[in-house]
Image: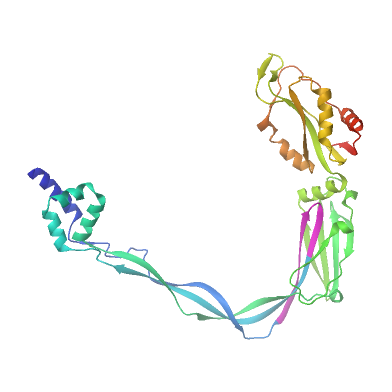
């Protein structure tokens, strides 16, 4: 028993020390004042004209090219500038629950010693009773705004009129000018945003070659100076505009089966979905009746009698190429000897005629 008491006292001496804990601040606890934000007050000068700017952007939505044009006048004006500052300080609190009397009672008692040895919470309470334990709190206080000088700010006005100059739209395909239009309808009045035009209203993109690149140039002549804004149309947007003006989409047919011969040489059957064949891609225009075509082809070419002929259809060649890149995630290819024959372009056109569909296809 004496030995256990001695051990307890040794353990307790580690908890208690009649000293100070966390009495000094850490190195990072620096009192400081920092600028949180700035704001502008009253103007101290009249606005002065600085320069003209020409802003433009485009968007392709529902196979339509929308171009927005925003001629802007920039003025400068001096304004008072104010800083909002915050004061950061670290304040010490404590000692927390420091009690020499309780410390002495706990040291000479038996049960408190035992509790301290098996209970971390009780040990922490012991520690605070026998030591001066301090806590540091970070405190922030917002200070009154301070004047931070004077700064020139830009003011945007949108008061452009047709009579203020000329504004031309140019469409280029593979670097060659294919369309140019004088844009009008600017009414001034300090409008809030840009003017927009739907280019498809006057230009037919089906005139272009399928792989043409597209870009737009906006030229604004004001007071004898030309402002130019070039917009490069993304390749997927250009493809969307051109292909969708000529075709309704692109598709291919594919034939897969399950519980069929996956290896035609070894006569090995599997429950995997096995891809037997896939046709080439076809551009199409007309009724989206491709499921009827697939049904007709299945009647003629389902030689294994366990398969399905399905359609994979997308809007543009790039889109269907992207989807095809994941085909091996869904199917495994048939292996072994030559698989059953797949339909030709004439076979597909024959099914279109048989079903009486208003559908034209073109090999891609």
**Residue 121 point in image, percent of width and height:** 26, 52
Determine the residue located farthest toward the top in the rendered image: 266
**Residue 141 point in image, percent of width and height:** 42, 74
Residue 300 in view (yes/no): yes
Q: Residue at left 86%, top 27%?
A: 344
Q: What stretch is highlighted in magenta?
A: 48-68
Relative side of 31 to 173, left or right: left
- In the rendered image, the quadrant that contains the N terminus is top left
- 121 or 331: nearer the eye? 121
Q: Residue at left 12%, top 44%?
A: 4
Q: In this view, does 360 lie above or below 230?
A: above
**Residue 355 point in image, percent of width and height:** 89, 32
As for residue 341 lying within the magenta part, the answer is: no
**Residue 203 point in image, percent of width and height:** 89, 56
Q: Is residue 277 above or below residue 190?
A: above
Relative side of 24 to 288, left or right: left
């Amino acid at each position: 028993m004496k030995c256990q008491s001695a051990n307890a006292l040794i353990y307790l001496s580690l908890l208690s020390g009649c000293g100070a804990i966390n009495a000094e601040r850490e190195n990072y606890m620096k009192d400081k004042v920092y600028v949180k934000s700035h704001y502008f007050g009253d103007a101290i000068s009249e606005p002065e004209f600085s320069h003209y700017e020409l802003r433009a952007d485009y968007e392709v939505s529902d196979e339509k090219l929308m171009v927005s044009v925003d001629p802007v006048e920039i003025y400068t004006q001096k304004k008072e500038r104010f800083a909002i500052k915050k004061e950061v300080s670290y304040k010490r609190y404590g000692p927390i629950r420091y009690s020499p009397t309780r410390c002495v009672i706990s040291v000479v008692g038996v049960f408190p010693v035992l509790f301290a040895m098996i209970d971390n919470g009780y040990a922490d309470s012991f520690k605070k009773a026998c030591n001066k334990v301090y806590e540091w709190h970070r405190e922030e206080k917002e200070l009154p705004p301070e004047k931070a000088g004077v700064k020139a700010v830009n003011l945007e006005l949108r008061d452009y009129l047709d009579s203020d100059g000329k504004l031309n739209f140019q469409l280029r395909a593979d670097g060659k000018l294919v369309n140019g239009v004088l844009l009008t309808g600017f009414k001034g009045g300090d409008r809030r945003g840009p003017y927009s035009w739907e280019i498809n209203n006057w230009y037919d993109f089906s005139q272009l070659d399928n792989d043409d690149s597209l870009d737009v140039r906006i030229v604004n002549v004001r007071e004898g100076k030309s402002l130019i804004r070039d917009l490069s149309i993304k390749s997927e947007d250009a493809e969307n505009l051109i292909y969708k003006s000529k075709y309704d989409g692109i598709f291919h047919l594919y034939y897969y089966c399950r519980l069929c011969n996956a290896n035609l040489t070894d006569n090995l059957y599997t429950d995997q979905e096995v891809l037997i064949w896939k046709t080439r891609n076809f551009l199409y225009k007309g009724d989206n009746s491709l499921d009827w075509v697939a049904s007709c082809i299945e009647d003629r070419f389902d030689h294994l009698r366990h398969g399905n002929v399905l359609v994979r259809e997308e809007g543009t060649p790039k889109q269907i190429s992207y989807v095809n890149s994941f085909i091996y995630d869904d199917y495994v290819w048939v292996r072994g000897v030559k698989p059953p024959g797949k339909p030709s372009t004439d076979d597909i056109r024959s099914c279109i005629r048989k079903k009486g569909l208003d559908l034209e296809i073109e090999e891609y």
